[in-house]
Amino acid sequence: FLRLPLDYRYWTQEETGDTWAAREPVLERIDRALRLATERGIHLSISLHRAPGYCVNPPAEPAPLWSDPRMQQRFVEQWEMFARRYRGVPGERLSFDLVNEPPAVGLGGILTGSSATRASHERIMRRAVGAIAAIDPGRRILANGLNYGNEPLPELADLAPRLGQACRAYRPFGVTHYKAHWVRDPWLRKPRSFSLSSFSLRT
């Protein structure tokens, strides 16, 4: 199993208004990745690590996927393009991972400045799944949990088995991201000493 994280900007060529065209030479590289994986008996999962309107990593997108209709349309169009391109490729060989690590919602979303809500996320994921299914009904699709993959999506459970759910295990976060250079929390980047009764534990 190979998850291929992709950035839509590499193959998306802006035109005028709301229209766009794809750069074929870039998409051919994805074709080649699928071909090489198939030759080696590896399932390829195409993942939008940076999708129109959202990426877990900086820089921020021009407008948020969760509240901007233009970004939502562009997001669905990206998956329609892939669905048409790979229509007929067996599900055992290829799956679609809709968007990498959606943000926190509720209080977590407020603290991180995200405009996402559970309802907006569900609406957009359902729209994308429906668009893919209309073109390629047999395609396997994955949705990452909210809060960067940590929270399951019971509101999408009725879409199984067409839609599966992918999760993370970033718990405790201080362990999974210890000394990660991209994390802003300074306490994760340096050793700390904790006194536990009669002994000291250094992390």
Image (spheres, rainbow, N blue to C red):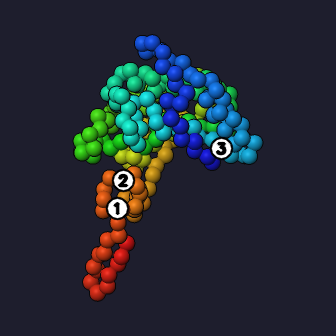
Percent coordinates x, y for residue 66 in the rendering:
34, 31
On the image, numbered disc 2 is attached to which residue? 183
Residue 132 in sight here? no
Query: What's under tag 1, amino acid-wise?
Result: Leu
- Kindly give the residue lying farthest to the bottom in the view shown: 198
Q: Nearer the viewer, residue 90 or 188?
A: 188
Q: Nearer the viewer, residue 146 or 50?
A: 50
Q: Horizontally, is 46 left or right of 111 in the view?
A: right
On the image, numbered disc 1 is attached to which residue? 188
Query: What's under tag 2, amino acid-wise?
Result: Val
Q: Quadrant of residue 28?
A: top right
Percent coordinates x, y for residue 71 in the rendering:
40, 25
Of labels 3 and 2, earlier in sequence is: 3
Percent coordinates x, y for residue 17 in the rendering:
42, 12
Of labels 3 and 1, earlier in sequence is: 3
Residue 74 in sight here? yes
Whether pointer 2 and pointer 1 mark residues with C-beta atoms closer than 8 Å, the reply is: yes
Q: Secondary structure at mark 3?
A: loop
Q: Quadrant of residue 81?
A: top right
On the image, numbered disc 3 is attached to which residue? 43
Whether pointer 3 and pointer 2 mark residues with C-beta atoms closer than 8 Å, the reply is: no
Q: Quadrant of the C terminus?
A: bottom left
Report the Cα–Cα distance between label 3 and label 2: 31 Å
Q: Horizontally, is 72 left or right of 129 in the view?
A: left
| Disc 1 packing (10 Å; few <14; some 14–19; many ≥20) | some
Query: What's under tag 3, amino acid-wise?
Result: His
Of labels 2 and 1, earlier in sequence is: 2
| Residue at 54% across, 41% down | 5
| Residue at 50% across, 31% down | 8
